[in-house]
Image (tube, rainbow, N blue to C red):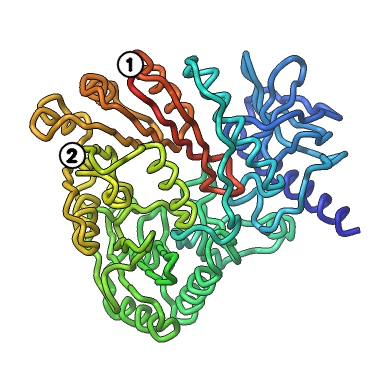
Amino acid sequence: MACVAFYAELCLTLRFRLIVFNIEMSRKRKELPIVENVEITDVAAEGNSIARIEGLATFIPFGAPGDVADIKIVRKKKNYAEGQILKLSQPSPIRVPHRCAHFTICGGCRWQHLPYSFQLECKQRQVKDAMERIAKIDIPEIMPILGSAQIWEYRNKMEYTFSNRSWLTREQMLSGQEFPDRDAAGFHIPGAFDKVLDIESCYLQDDLGNRLRLFIKRYAKENGLSFYDIKAQEGLLRTLMIRIASTGEVMAVMVFGKNDNVAIQGLMEAVHNEFPDIVSLQYVVNMKVNDTISDQEVVLYSGREYIEEEMEGLRFRIGPKSFYQTNSKQSYELYKVARDFAGLDGSELVYDLYTGTGTIANFISSKAKKVIGIEYVPEAIADAKVNSQVNGIGNTEFFAGDMKDVLTDEFIARHGRPDVVIVDPPRAGMHQDVVDVILNAAPERIVYVSCNPATQARDLSLLDIKYKVDAIRPVDMFPHTQHVENVVKLTLR
């Protein structure tokens, strides 16, 4: 009976999402069909599943291979279609109950309904497909993906949004009731920038994150503090960032939309009293249009301005603006793979490109003669230098600036030809100018760490003129999502 109830609830949730979608569609658009008893055959890009309907590849969210379902076509193009599950008539045998009550609504954790072992299999195939379909170069057998030992509460950083315009749930919409109180603390609804889903529990971070968020919401309601109106750009409570390090240290950064000092001090003191173990309690008054705080002053309310992560005895200071991989324990596994692929013996000059806060640079420094790190964000480079200093590391040097402007042939002539280059670029991959400079420098080895196997594969094809791929290892940093990190070792031909 529990399984029947679970699948009934899933069908209702998916059907509700379809109703909302159809309401928002233009009335002028031609009505598209419902196709019954469609078998979903595989997973696809962006966390979707795939089926073939009338000869077209049809992408369907929240499906599982083996599902048989009635599919409502919601968009039809020349070469593909998009659909929604209207009725799940025969659930796939591999389906598992989703843990989160907000599954299918908040937009995250799109693979909660798939077993973790199958998630890993899909990510392994994603890497293999990118290498074969995009790179089109000779590759060795891909090593087995490194799964995450912790598949819940693995994130060290979460960001929540406060809004006076909450997204109404299925039950609320169908109840016929009026909801004058729309205050919410949660996540943006995908495709609706001004709508925020009120979150009761999120299982991606330690439960302290839930307790802290809910306390702030309750205090604000009890004390008449306004929640931010995203459209009107007004209100007090705007966003909340919570960092929980692997060391157990906690940082909370509250962002306010107006400078009401009395209200701000009252809330911060209440948080401090309720959660005295918070190591770093800070706040920002952000009155500009977007939510980013990189250009805003951060005010320390109590504790110190940073928390610390630890890795092999090294301490890494993390500030409110610092970048650090969001899965601390799995980051360690990722960096060990990168270090192993680098093959250092202590004699090498290493360039760490897109170094961030210098985590990889400092992590490998004991195995290298010298490490030079380059990163676009000046605050991150400042963190990298501090992290070297506090750990007594004297063989690192860091430079800030756009990679294609800093890393030039002249830069290499001035600082030395690298023996090893480690790159960990953003999802867009490397700029052609950066690839050209690396090819001119001709290091003995390149270690390419990527969060996007597709752009990584494109770059590998550009490097193929001088380099061959010797090893590939995927690493799963984000259970229950389609995202995967991949590490590739290249050697000079």
* Disc on the earlier residue, 2 or 1: 2
- Tell me what residue is drawn at x 29 percent, y 63 percent: 317
Q: Farthest residue in the bottom direction?
A: 273
Q: Quadrant of residue 352?
A: top left
Of circles 2 and 1, the one toward us is 1
Q: Is residue 48 left or right of residue 221?
A: right
Q: Is residue 334 left or right of residue 412?
A: right
Which residue lies under the disc numbered 1?
466
> Who is closer to the viewer here, 374 or 295?
374
Q: Farthest residue in the left direction?
A: 414
Q: Residues within 10 Å of mark 1 (few under 14, many from 20)?
A: few
Can the viewer see residue 155 in this picture? yes
- Tell me what residue is drawn at x 75 percent, y 31 percent: 72
Which residue lies under the disc numbered 2?
401
For the residues labelled 2 and 1, the Cα–Cα distance comes to: 27 Å
Can the viewer see residue 318 in this picture? no
Q: Looking at the image, is 92 positioned above or below residue 129?
A: below
